Image (cartoon, coloured by chain):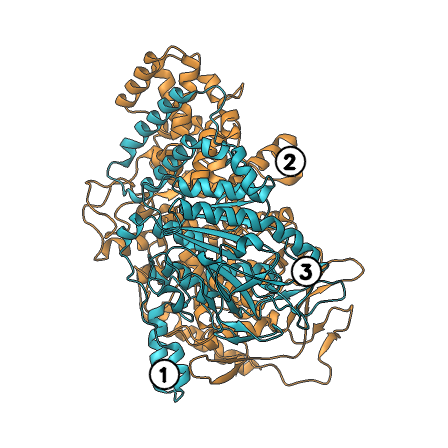
């Protein structure tokens, strides 16, 4: 039975102590002991001024680790593609990612994820929440809450996608930290004033609104009233920055990134990050290759590779990589075994992810799988470890708790910890 | 048999309060509540006054009927000299069909937490809830129906939505049984006894699981309809991740005695489970769940609903969060919660009775405005709390304020015409935009919501509707206009200063119709409107 995730770390520390007291196993003890802190973690205020950001690229459907970050050419399940050298000596990735290969010196690979989940939604939620079950905020909502300053110029968590249901991403953190979902490069809904109003009239009615609110606030508790007003101010910011959403990409950029949708989403992500968004998530759909896995990955990764590489260049050239954590993730990997339709199926047992920027050690390979890729051979981690790693990379103490009225909830899964090697 | 019966009768009689002490006739529940609240050490002697008539009327309309009153209703109430007009209004609202609609929303949010449900259509479920409120079905009866329906019979199928929409997922159902019916989120006790909450034990979690572990979803191959089947065997075992101890449990309701299965008979099934045949055991643990949950011995069941109804009316639970009842998180006012739970038992889980008594309290009827700017969070119930309007309250109230609906909101699908369907759609738009999941006393606001209010077509169409409020304000002079605007939108008379401000604004602009539209918009999206105060 999987350990449940709703409990606070104090409880678990207590329980661990009790447990360890009665346990003779030094190995278990070592794995439960808290790792040495790699970074000095910042206090809330300085964290919000630190300008740390997250760019999260989600390859929806489950990218095949064998056709991307952990190729096994010439082995039983290796498939037809070769491995190519990268800008990091000794590091090889699939030949489907030639542009990315020459930017791997910015990035590190984790090749030893065993999340034990083969369900799309549950796998995605585990990746996003750092917990296998339960009602917890997504990574982007956590980033919005703790990294976005009160005067942030854009909502803290923006998700560019063309599909997907409306998730409750913020859980108990509140709607202002929920994802603002953009339908591709479409601006958010309701950004335009009603036709019979202009900016002057809009300012006038805003001032009327505040006039109504002022007497009502007298002798009343203000926290909720402020929350309501803050949403109007956020809306005003979005309206004022409408051009960001409408600005079509330049010819020059399009020629570098490409003209397809994902290329345009990457360009929008760049613009949003440059304009004060705290976490931008871009979802690239279409990796669920139960049939024709190899053709699918040729096509999908062909679309992903170049714009992603260009985005890495731009973040690096503009000096943003120091403060931007870049993640390329999926809900799980794909089975080594190739099925009868030349497909690969869902696989949470041994798969890979990539991260870099924001002080994360670059050019590293964490963990490994066995020769045929059927199991993790070394340094097994799960999505909970990744979640801790992401948060600590941006300076957040993932062992701290969300401080809520009536209960406190640990930010990261108390059963997991960060991958310290990446943060040193 | 006869002797046993007599014996129990005697026990019952000897415990009845009438014989134990000659108490004076008990005061009505609402007076007892007020006495306990005001005697509590946290109660501030300089508590707020009673809310004025207009504020009271708006508050009670929203809480009991789900929508602000019409301007006409406000006028009549303000004019009414009778001393018991508040009580009359409460009774009239509780007897109205709008109350059933309001409670349908409340119960839906409480039970389904805004899931987009499978298997049972939303309108069937709504009709079931609404009819239950119209019949004033007691809470225990409603919950028994919900937990015992297997979805195989058309007449009881809507009630099965609670289990069907959760796909009978063992952990999800267990957790929600604990949270929604017992006020206890036992999630932490799934894998070990809760380390710091002494009374959340792993056997509590699995005791609930054991009731449902034999039940499963059955899809009829002919009709394609999914219902609930049950096996006659199967037990739960659990292992603590801390101690590695493994234990089993029979079904049990928290610390009440476990319910052992009856001795195995030769024949276990009414209908034997087979491929394409829905199993129906002779002894159903799921039916035991419906009984054990609602049994008088299960005190947690009534403490939970008492706390949740209190939260609906007062804006916060006596225990917060609503699903974290345990020893170390005691109620702010334990005696009040005990009293409410005991009254519910005495009155056969009559929620309408409970809501009436709560509405009659001075605690409920207090102003939300403190006498001075002091910090009133430390003095609960000395000042009334602001309650954010639910998405449905907000939708109905905005439509009423803008004159889109002028009569009572009625949601009766049988009588629904095309206009009603449009209104229903508007309500759903709001539910999608403003919902926060399950019953909660937290207030949330997001930029998307503000954009919807600022620039959305829907609100704009209400402001510019031909026969709406804005049009009807056009012919009025400034003072009349201010009065009508405040009555329609804020359900109260404007102060002199407010009237003057409206007049000043109108005089300052050249486009009067547009100015009226601006004013109405600003009033509609103001905090005064957004909250039940």
**Pointer 2 chain:** B
Which residue is found at the position 65% from the left and 79% from the top? B233
**What is the letter of the orange chain?**
B
Residue B225 in the image: x percent, y percent? 73, 58
Residues beneath discs 1 and 2 located on the same chain = no
Q: Is residue B449 left or right of residue A333?
A: left
On residue B416, which mark appears? 2
The first of marks 2 and 3 along the sequence is: 3
Residue B35 in the image: x percent, y percent? 27, 54
Measure the alpha-carbon separation of dots 2 and 3: 26 Å
From this viewpoint, which residue is outermost toward the bottom?
Answer: A24
Which residue is found at the position 66% from the left and 51% from the top? A299
Residue B241 in the image: x percent, y percent? 45, 79
Judging by the rendered image, the residue that carries numbered circle 1 is A20
Residue A282 visible in rendering: no
Measure the alpha-carbon separation of dots 1 and 3: 48 Å
Which secondary structure, mark 1? helix
In this rendering, which labeled residue sits more in front, label 1 or label 3? Answer: 1
């Amino acid at each position: 039975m999987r350990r449940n995730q709703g409990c606070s770390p104090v409880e678990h520390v207590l329980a661990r102590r009790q447990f360890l007291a009665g346990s003779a196993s030094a190995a278990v003890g070592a794995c439960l002991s808290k790792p040495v802190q790699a970074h000095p973690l910042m206090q809330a205020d300085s964290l919000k001024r630190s300008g740390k950001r997250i760019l999260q690229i989600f390859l929806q459907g489950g990218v095949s680790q064998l056709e991307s970050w952990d190729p096994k050419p010439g082995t039983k399940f290796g498939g037809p593609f070769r491995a190519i050298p990268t800008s990091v000596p000794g590091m090889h990735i699939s030949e489907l990612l030639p542009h990315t290969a020459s930017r791997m010196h910015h990035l590190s690979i984790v090749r030893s994820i065993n999340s034990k989940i083969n369900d799309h939604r549950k796998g995605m939620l585990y990746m996003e929440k750092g917990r296998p079950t339960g009602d917890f905020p997504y990574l982007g909502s956590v980033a919005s809450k703790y990294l976005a300053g009160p005067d942030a110029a854009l909502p803290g968590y923006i998700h560019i996608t063309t599909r997907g249901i409306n998730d409750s991403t913020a859980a108990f953190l509140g709607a202002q930290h929920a994802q603002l979902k953009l339908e591709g490069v479409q601006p958010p809904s309701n950004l335009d004033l009603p036709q019979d109003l202009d900016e002057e009239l809009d300012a006038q009615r805003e001032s009327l609104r505040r006039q109504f609110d002022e007497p009502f606030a007298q002798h009343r508790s203000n926290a909720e009233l402020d929350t309501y007003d803050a949403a109007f101010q956020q809306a005003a910011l979005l309206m004022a920055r409408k051009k960001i959403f409408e600005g079509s990409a330049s010819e020059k950029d399009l020629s570098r990134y490409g003209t397809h949708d994902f290329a345009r989403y990457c360009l929008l992500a760049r613009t949003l990050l440059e304009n004060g968004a705290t976490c931008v998530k871009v979802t690239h759909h279409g990796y669920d290759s139960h049939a024709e896995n190899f053709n699918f990955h040729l096509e999908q990764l062909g679309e992903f590779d170049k714009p992603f590489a260009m985005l890495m260049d731009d973040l690096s050239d503009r000096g943003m990589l120091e403060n931007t954590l870049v993640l390329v993730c999926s809900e799980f990997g794909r089975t080594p075994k190739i099925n009868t339709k030349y497909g690969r199926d869902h696989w949470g047992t041994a798969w890979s992810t990539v991260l870099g920027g924001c002080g994360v050690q670059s050019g590293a390979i964490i963990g490994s799988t066995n020769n045929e890729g059927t199991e993790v051979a070394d340094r097994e981690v799960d999505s909970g470890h990744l979640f801790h790693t992401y948060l600590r990379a941006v300076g957040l103490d993932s062992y701290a708790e969300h401080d809520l009225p009536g209960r406190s909830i640990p930010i990261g899964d108390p059963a997991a910890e960060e991958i310290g090697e990446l943060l040193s | 048999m006869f002797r046993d019966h007599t014996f129990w009768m005697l026990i019952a009689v000897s415990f009845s309060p009438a014989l134990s002490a000659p108490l004076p006739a008990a005061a009505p529940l609402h007076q007892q509540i007020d006495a306990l609240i005001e005697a509590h050490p946290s109660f501030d002697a300089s508590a707020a006054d009673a809310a004025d008539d207009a504020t009271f009327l708006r508050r009670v309309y929203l809480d009991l009927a789900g929508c602000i009153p019409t301007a006409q209703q406000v006028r009549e109430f303000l004019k009414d000299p009778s001393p018991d007009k508040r009580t009359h209004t409460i009774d009239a609202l509780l007897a109205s069909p709008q109350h059933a609609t309001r409670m349908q929303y409340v119960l839906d949010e409480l039970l389904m937490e805004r899931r987009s449900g499978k298997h049972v259509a939303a309108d069937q479920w709504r009709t079931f809830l609404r009819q239950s409120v119209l019949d004033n079905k007691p809470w225990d009866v409603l919950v028994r129906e919900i937990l015992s329906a297997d979805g195989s019979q058309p007449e009881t199928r809507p009630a099965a939505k609670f289990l069907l929409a959760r796909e009978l997922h063992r952990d999800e159902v267990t957790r929600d049984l604990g949270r929604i019916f017992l006020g206890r989120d036992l999630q932490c006790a799934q894998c070990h006894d809760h380390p710091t909450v002494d009374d959340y034990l792993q056997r509590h979690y699995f005791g609930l699981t054991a009731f449902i572990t034999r039940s499963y979803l059955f899809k009829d191959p002919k009709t394609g309809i999914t219902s609930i089947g049950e096996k006659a065997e199967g037990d739960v075992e659990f292992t603590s991740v801390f101690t590695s101890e493994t234990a089993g449990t029979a079904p049990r309701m928290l610390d009440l005695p476990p319910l052992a299965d009856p001795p195995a008979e030769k024949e276990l099934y009414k209908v034997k489970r087979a491929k394409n045949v829905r199993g129906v055991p002779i002894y159903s643990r799921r039916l035991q769940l419906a009984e054990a949950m609602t049994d008088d011995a299960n005190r947690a069941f009534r403490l939970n609903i008492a706390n949740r109804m209190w939260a609906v009316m007062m804006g916060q639970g006596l225990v917060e969060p609503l699903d974290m009842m345990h020893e170390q998180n005691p109620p702010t006012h334990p005696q009040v919660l005990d009293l409410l739970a005991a009254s519910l038992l005495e009155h056969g889980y009559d929620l309408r009775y409970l809501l009436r008594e709560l509405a009659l309290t001075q605690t409920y009827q207090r102003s939300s405005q403190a006498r001075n700017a002091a910090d009133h969070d430390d003095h609960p119930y000395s000042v009334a709390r602001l309650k954010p309007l639910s998405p449905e309250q907000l939708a109905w109230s905005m439509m009423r304020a803008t004159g889109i609906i002028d009569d009572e909101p009625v949601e009766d699908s049988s009588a629904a015409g095309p206009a009603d369907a449009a209104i229903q759609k508007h309500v759903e738009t709001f539910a999608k935009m403003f919902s926060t999941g399950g019953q909660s006393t937290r207030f949330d606001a997001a930029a998307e919501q503000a954009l919807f209010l600022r620039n959305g077509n829907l609100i704009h169409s209400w402001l510019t509707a031909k026969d709406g409020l804005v049009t009807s304000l056009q012919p009025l002079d400034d003072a009349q206009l201010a009065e009508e605007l405040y009555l329609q939108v804020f359900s109260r008379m404007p102060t002199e200063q407010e009237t003057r401000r409206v007049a000043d604004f109108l005089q300052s602009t050249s486009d009067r119709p547009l100015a009226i539209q601006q004013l109405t918009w600003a009033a509609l999206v103001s905090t005064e409107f957004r909250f039940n105060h």
